[in-house]
Image (cartoon, grey):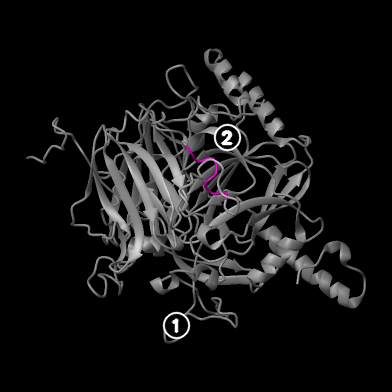
Amino acid sequence: MVIGLSMLAGTTSMLSCMDRATAQQDQQIKRIVTPPPAAQVLRARSSGSLLALDAIITGPPLVSGEAVIELNIDYTDSKIYNPATGDYDAVRLRSYKDAKQTAPAKVPFVAPTIDISPGETVRLTLRNLLKPENENCPSRDGKINTPHCFNRTNLHSHGLWISPAGNSDNVLISINPGVDFQYEYNVPPDHPAGTFWYHPHLHGSTALQVSSGMAGLLIVRGNRPPTSQSPGDIDTLLKESTGAPYPERPVLLQQVQYACRDASGKIEVDANGAYACKPGEVGGIESYDQFGPGSWPESGRYTSVNGEVLPLFPGAQAGRIERWRIAHAGVRDSVKLQFKKMRPGVVYGQLADAKAQQDWVAANCLGDPLPQFAIASDGLTRRKIAQRQTTVLQPGYREDLLMVFPEAGDYCVIDDQAPANANINADVKSRKLLGSVNVGVGNPPGSDLRAFVTAQLLAAADRNVPVASRQKVRDDLSNDLRLTSFAPHLDMSDTEVKGHRQAADLRIGGTGFGVNGVPYDPTGAPRVLILGSADEWTLTAGVPGHPFHIHVNPFQIMEIRNPSHVDVSVDGEADDPQYANLKGEWRDTLFVKAGYTIVARSRYRRYVGDFVLHCHILDHEDQGMMQNVRVAIPDGAGGVAMNHH
């Protein structure tokens, strides 16, 4: 039961209620959203000296150099708050740990945030400290698409535009227990600044490890202003009058689907069928029976925010623009993000189940959702800011939002309801609470938040954009909040596509999970793309719909046709806003609804080698919904050059 503090009075029974409400409020105060821990990054200058990250970010910009990072992978014992019981569950899960940090992390199942710059060489050493004993390695039936080898791993820098070969972003290697491996990412000087993330990507164990919390933000910070020849980094615009960047909220959404098991190995549940752990039991993730269609809502687990469940975001001020960098690092649930004003004087303590959440949100989260101003998707700055009330995040997505809270008070952070065809689990999604934001007294921005944001960005352009580019930036912002001077990729023209066509159909069929009807075969012939060429892709998916993701090269969305062949990439749909304002934008991950057709274009520049495309419902990937891709050197006659020695 949740009680408004203003309703409490002085009787004995009411004092008991007050005690409970105070305890609930204390729990909220303890679960404060803090940024994920910063990775201890060392950088080498030409002198050979090593400097910490903050010395570089605040000092002279680096043209080139080395960033050195060390991560360990091991089991971690900790606890996760469970609103169903109002208490914490003990858990033992695989996690990333910064090898240089000695103090225990506040939220151990959130990997350190890695900050890098364009032009750097990033050397990341991964140490697999997990035990070699694992009953699932190799797979019990000897098949590659049966989940297996849960203690083997590797690392994928999701969204980075770097080489997929050798010891760069190579997801086709295995780092076994007891092995240290150093990745080397040569980040090009023209790499877009933006919000990316990293996670394990070894076929057969990806979902299990990511669901354990093995995921972290990877932020590329840029300092290049726009010029007449090249786009600039949006970071150079988003600064306050003091010269400080807009306040940032790094937000890592995770879905840690831990379970406790009885003596026979069966998942323990409560009277409602939700996962339950008895006192003294320790939850874990050791089997793929914890994944599958509908398993996330049935589990009763909660989407966490930077490792905290139902937490409070502190420190916002009315009328101050914030940049929310959001990454969906979950495995198989959609998030439909909204912000609403919260009824004064209420707390959200023990919300026992989905219905309790739904009822609490309906009673206490008031009015229309606040406007959100989306400046980037999947780390790539948009051609123009998209104003929306709802941001739909599917697994693998990133969104950068500018948020303005109009007045002091508390605000609900909501995962709103959605129809069955709009979300990963293919069932009607109920409304949930993710947390709250506490907003202090500031400078009221007025009732027209779009006009306020426009005025603030124009003033920022006057302060921060060089004179030669300033008028164009101002004209763009004044024309429907356009950001063409900061968009990193040129539009793809009809003439650029040389007649090549690529098709990717993600579905579950008679042969199991597959792409174009074929389950993943690591030894089979890869899809071959030609370096320097460009293709138009047709993306389709079977029930329940699947998020398509391809490594290395992003794609530009040309059309999204619904089953009636209507393009919904401009206005979206009445019951589902997720495709609105996507025409012409660039992504690396996109949910393909069953029965819909997405037409996208991609160019293949600079990097050759083998990588993958796959469904980002990660247990689908582990069971075969993945395909090898190869970018090869042209032979000068319309084909590709053969390998030679």
Check residue 266 in the rendering and tell me which mark sits there, or answer none.
1
Label the magenta part by its dominant secondary structure.
loop
Residue 579 included in the magenta stretch of the image? yes
Query: Residue 375 location in percent, x, y?
Result: 55, 36
Name the residue furthest top: 468
Query: Residue 257 location in percent, x, y?
Result: 49, 67
Secondary structure at numbered mark 1 = loop
Give whichever of discs 1 and 2 has the lower sequence position: 1
Asked which quadrant contains residue 146, the reply is: bottom left
Give the class, few, some or many, for how many residues have Cα within 10 Å of label 1's Cα (few <14, many ≥20). Answer: few
The answer, for residue 525, to whether it is visible in the render is: yes
Check residue 385 in the rendering and tell me which mark sits there, or answer none.
2
The answer, for residue 348, to whether it is visible in the render is: no
In screen coordinates, is 303 left or right of 361?
Answer: left
In the rendered view, would you say 499 is above or below 341? above
Query: Residue 450 location in percent, x, y?
Result: 69, 34
Residue closer to the observer: 295 or 492: 492
In screen coordinates, is 565 left or right of 408?
Answer: left
Q: Amino acid at mark 1?
A: Lys
| Span colored in magenta | 577-583
In screen coordinates, is 610 left or right of 544?
Answer: left
